[in-house]
Image (tube, helix red, strand yellow):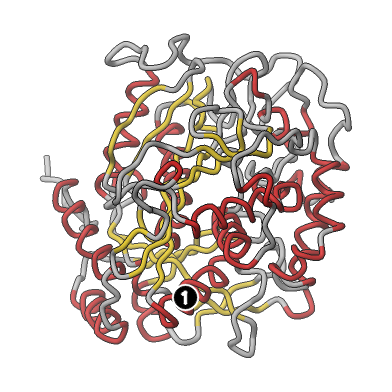
Amino acid sequence: MAESIKIRDFLEIPYDELEAMNLEAKKKALEKSPLEKVQAEYTQYLEKEKRLKAVTLCFSDIEGRFHCLDYDKKFFLRSQDNLTFDGSSVHGYAEISESDLRLFPDWYSFRWLPSDVFGPGKVLMFASVANQDGKLHPSDMRSCLKTLLDQMYEKDKMQYWLAPEIEGFVVEGRSAEQKFDEKIGFQFISEGGYYHNLPTDKLKKFIDRAAEAQRSMGFENEKDHPEVAPSQFELNYSYTDALLAADQIQIYKLASRQIAQDLDITATFLPKPFVGINGSGMHTNISLSRNGKNLFYAKNSKHNLSKQAWDFIGKILYYAKDICLILNSSVNAYRRLDPKFEAPNQIRVSPTDRSAMIRLPLGNERTTRMEVRSVAPDCNPYMVAYVLLKTGLEGEKCAETTNGAECKNILPADIYEAIQYFRDSDFMAKVLTKEVKEKYLHFKQAAADRSPKNLGKTIKNGEVIYHHEITNQILWNSF
């Protein structure tokens, strides 16, 4: 019998090497190595590495839905200044009459991929979306965030740091979201809770594989564990620059979904896929620094927080209802905002009470931060990071909430109330521009209109199958 011939030889890198390579790439971005040098280095690498077949470019639409395009490597190298795509079917971008848009690769985001998750022979970069004239598209919130961060650093070396804590569930069956039936609901894969699971059960296998993939991509994991609810998980990793943090959120969710599918289960980031138990949040830890100094820390002050930190907190609380639709962007998200299940709905700040919208974790000179607990994991992470920063720096502040006093106000009870506050907010038009505000509002109103107004005590078909992150092109084309 003839010996088999290996006809494919695409790049596959061991996880330990991947981690070292991606940490070095991440370091270049954080240390702001000269862009021309970084681009030249990676371009040369792409030209020399014969086992690479494609460059995956990633971007997000206005709702935060993640999109990836594979460009043939040779085509990418000769056309990197003219990479176009059809934006007419991507929410928030072009109309059919002007569908061609451009993608500009962000060379600082260059990453090598674990081949058992993403396939062999590929590398990944994020990209900015631009109009036909080359100007950045106003609906591309990643570009908005990147521009703002660059301006802050150029002005006075201020930097914005995030550490997101992303919770999710894994449930029985492939494509469980698309096949959701409210009469049956989702099915747990594990009945265990916080820290409770067998070493090789389905939940632990999923967590282990997802954590391994994250480490290989330079996430700098800290701890990985089941969460409070059955079949729930959380994989924590180190704080980083806000743009990198938002990119990592998108990769976190994409890799989790792929790994779950490989195990014949589904990873879901619906904020509340089950009633009667804890939902999933994305607690977002925020701090500002300048020249390595934490601007939120002030020794011997109240909770060791600086005046700038208290001002930042006060402004976010002042606009809590205006920005709620950004932080909680789906019909399902409003089920989660229930203090009986450790979810924050009170517009106040507290060092201990987890029902408060903002918590003040224990910290030292390096780690002092604020934690915005009302963020849902199905948000647009770039829009959330951008809006929180703009609000904390440029908004008005409420003296009552700034000094930590009890606040009787609570967040909107459903998406309809959140939509109304968002629609009436002049501040949101200022932060996002009127055009982007109206586009975002259009998609959120459409989602709300497809779901029952009364949430009730059961998860409804509409809030799952019409959810912006649950891809079902046939269903979307019905609208």
Q: Nearer the viewer, residue 281 or 3?
A: 281
The picture places residue 281, in percent across and down from the top left corner, at 55, 35
In the image, residue 13 sits, relative to residue 149, either above or below, namely: above
In this rendering, the count of numbered labels is 1
Circle 1: residue type: Met
In the image, residue 122 sits, relative to residue 318, either above or below, namely: below
- The answer to whether 439 appears left or right of 390 in the picture is right
Secondary element type, mark 1: helix
The residue drawn where x is 30% and y is 67% is 30
The picture places residue 162, in percent across and down from the top left corner, at 43, 53
- The answer to whether 447 appears left or right of 108 in the picture is right
> Given the current orientation, which residue lies at the most extreme front position?
300
The residue drawn where x is 28% and y is 64% is 292
In the image, residue 184 sits, relative to residue 438, either above or below, namely: above
Q: Is residue 10 visible?
A: no
The residue drawn where x is 28% and y is 63% is 26
Q: Nearer the viewer, residue 479 or 24?
A: 24
Q: Quadrant of residue 417?
A: top right
Which of the image's four quarters has the N terminus? top left
The picture places residue 440, in percent across and down from the top left corner, at 75, 59
Q: Quadrant of residue 330?
A: top right
- The answer to whether 5 appears left or right of 443 in the picture is left
In the image, residue 160 sits, relative to residue 368, either above or below, namely: below
Q: What residue does disc 1 label?
A: 152
Q: Is residue 369 visible?
A: yes
The picture places residue 131, in percent across and down from the top left corner, at 64, 82
- The answer to whether 358 appears left or right of 401 in the picture is left
Q: Residues within 10 Å of mark 1 (few under 14, many from 20)?
A: some
